[in-house]
Image (cartoon, grey):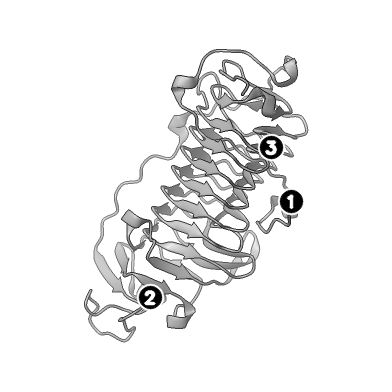
Amino acid sequence: MTHKGWSPHSNRSLTIPFPLPVRASLLTNLLLLSGGAAILLAHPQNYALAGIAKQAPQKIITEVIYVNPNIGTDTVADNSQSAPYRTIAYAMQQASSGTAIQLASGSYTNKNGEIFPIVVKQGVILRGDASTKGQTINIIGGGYYISPTLSAQNVTVRAEKDSEISGVSITNPNTRGTALWIESSNPTVKNNTFSNSNREGVFLSGTANPKIEDNIFTKNLGNGISIAKMSAGEIRNNVIDNTGIGIVVSESASPAIAQNRILKNRQGVDVGGDATPLLRNNIIENNRENGVVATGNAGPNLGTKASPGQNRIRNNGQYDIYNVTRNNTIFAVGNDIDLKRISGRVDFVNTPATGS
């Protein structure tokens, strides 16, 4: 199979997949290392759940702009719900920090005048219907964007500092298309659907530090979420299924990945380069190849004695944890993992791991 997702290998970084969360009631104490060999664990990282990004304060809305692709016009003098604009791009030109742009149901495409990529300006809220995760509010298309860290890209939406996107569906069907690009900014992305893009649902680059929570990622040909360069942030409570690789973490990225369901993808979590993601309380199951993969000099933290992982990583096609790093041991304390589906050096100190 040809993998269409962005690959860190193109930047001389390697990738590793990550596991999903497990319930604390399943945990017991046990010292066991893969292959039965005792391994001296070097340089354990002291991650704590307190290090996960704090809940952002609710934004104060100073103005609401209405957009409707079916009845709107971009020449209207006084915008209102009954006299909306037609395009998101035009509404963004009128918006400033504190503005909420409210989208009506419909398709937002270049056919009705959208110009891509749509840039969600600093402090602006782009919102549709959070209760349905934007199922009837579809932003479809893509345009040329020069990333200062990863060169030319094809992007549907780009989110700037302190912006928010909620309650919309975003798709980029273009070749190597990414639905949402986050470049060295800290948006909140919640209650959306990212589906059927030619490459990723969301790409983080530079020093991105977003909150990505309560979204659906499905049927993207490449990856659900790609996290590159020195990006961090919080990836929480998302469903990622039926895509290429659920989450790719590469280079020096260090996100917190918590409470996600990563299911039925080609591969679950792929970690490479020098990436050091923290994985807690995820469910990573039924991926066709591996659950969590680590390569290069990657150091995914799946749990320590001080902070058990509580991930459930099971029933993946090849291995549940596949460590092919050069010298690293993966810490995986306090998870629900089948010990017979492990390859490479993995430390399960105090982990209740049982065979199938």
* Viewer-proximal residue among 63 and 335: 335
* Viewer-proximal residue among 186 and 323: 323
Question: Judging from the image, what secondary structure is the residue with disc 1 in?
Answer: helix
Q: Are marks 3 and 2 in contact (CB under 8 Å)?
A: no
* Viewer-proximal residue among 210 and 303: 303
Closer to the chain start, of discs 1 and 2, is 1
Q: Residue at x 74, y 28 (%)?
A: 344
Look at label 3 and name its amino acid: Ala
Query: Based on the displayed image, in which of its 4 quarters is residue 102 positioned?
Result: bottom left
Q: Residue at x 65, y 41 (%)?
A: 271
In the picture provided, is 287 more to the left or to the right than 14?
A: left
**For mark 2, what is the residue?**
93
Dot 2, how many residues are within 10 Å of its Cα: few (below 14), some (14-19), or many (20+)?
Answer: few
Question: Judging from the image, what secondary structure is the residue with disc 2 in?
Answer: helix
**For mark 3, what is the residue?**
294
Question: Judging from the image, what secondary structure is the residue with disc 3 in?
Answer: strand
Give the label on residue 9, or none.
Answer: 1
Distance from disc 3 to disc 2, alpha carbons, whole Å, reads 43 Å
Q: Position of residue 86 (x, y in %)?
A: 35, 79
Closer to the chain start, of discs 3 and 2, is 2
